[in-house]
Amino acid sequence: RNAEGIAKFAAREAHRLAPSSGDDDVAASSPARLASIDLALRVVAATLVTKAETSDDDAAAIAARDGAALSTAEMHPDDLRAAADALDALSLNIGVPRDMDEPAANALRAYTRLVAETLREPSRRGPASRGDAAA
C-alpha cells in the first residue's frame, strides 16, 4: 500500500547520507532506481517471513541470498548499489518505539543490512545472479 513512499524515503535518505557527485537526488526520481529499491524491500520482507515461519536464521539467510539473486539478476549494477545504499539508510531510520518494538526493529535492521550486503556482493547472491545453471 505504501511501497512507493517507503522506496522514495529510503532513496532520499541514502542520497542525504552519501550524495552522488553533482546529482540532485537522482535516486529518488529515477523509476529504475525506485523499482530496484522496491524489489530489495520485498526481499527483506520475504526474508523476515521466512524467519518468522521457520525460526531458523540459516533459512532466513538463504532466503535473503536466493531472493536477492532472483529479484536482481537483470538489474544494472548502479541500481543494485542504490538499492543497497537505500536499505542501509532505512536501517538507520527505524525508530523504537515510534515504528515498532525493539525485537522487531532489531530483526528488521539485521535483515535489511543482510540483504544490502548481499546486493553489494555478487558472490553472496547465489547462482541466478552470476548466470550459473540453476541448482
Image (tube, rainbow, N blue to C red):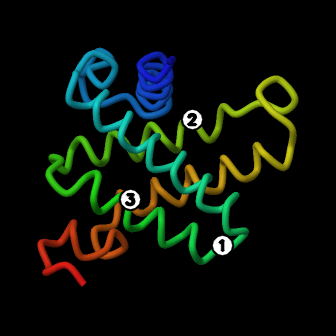
5 sits to left or right of 80: right
Mark 1 and mark 3 in contact? Answer it, CB < 8 Å: no
Q: Secondary structure at mark 3?
A: helix
Amino acid of disc 2: Leu
Spatial CA distance of label 1 from label 2 is 21 Å
Amino acid of disc 1: Asp
* Mark 3 or mark 2, earlier in chain: 3
Choose between 9 and 135: the one closer to the eye: 135
* Mark 1 or mark 3, earlier in chain: 1
Q: Which mark is residue 90?
A: 2
- Residue 85 in which image quadrant: top left
Q: Which residue is the site of mark 1?
A: 57
Q: Position of residue 69 (x, y in %)?
A: 29, 62
Q: Position of residue 75 (x, y in %)?
A: 18, 47
For the point 27% across and 15% down, which residue is it?
A: 29
Q: Position of residue 65 (x, y in %)?
A: 41, 67
Q: Which residue is the site of mark 3?
A: 67
For the point 21% across and 44% down, which residue is it?
A: 78
- Residue 126 in which image quadrant: bottom left
For the point 65% across and 56% down, which residue is it?
A: 110
Badge 2 density bin: few <14, some 14–19, many ≥20, Cα 10 Å: many
4 sits to left or right of 58: left
65 sits to left or right of 59: left
Spatial CA distance of label 3 from label 2 is 19 Å
Above or below, 7 against 114 in this view is above
For the point 57% across and 67% down, which residue is it?
A: 60
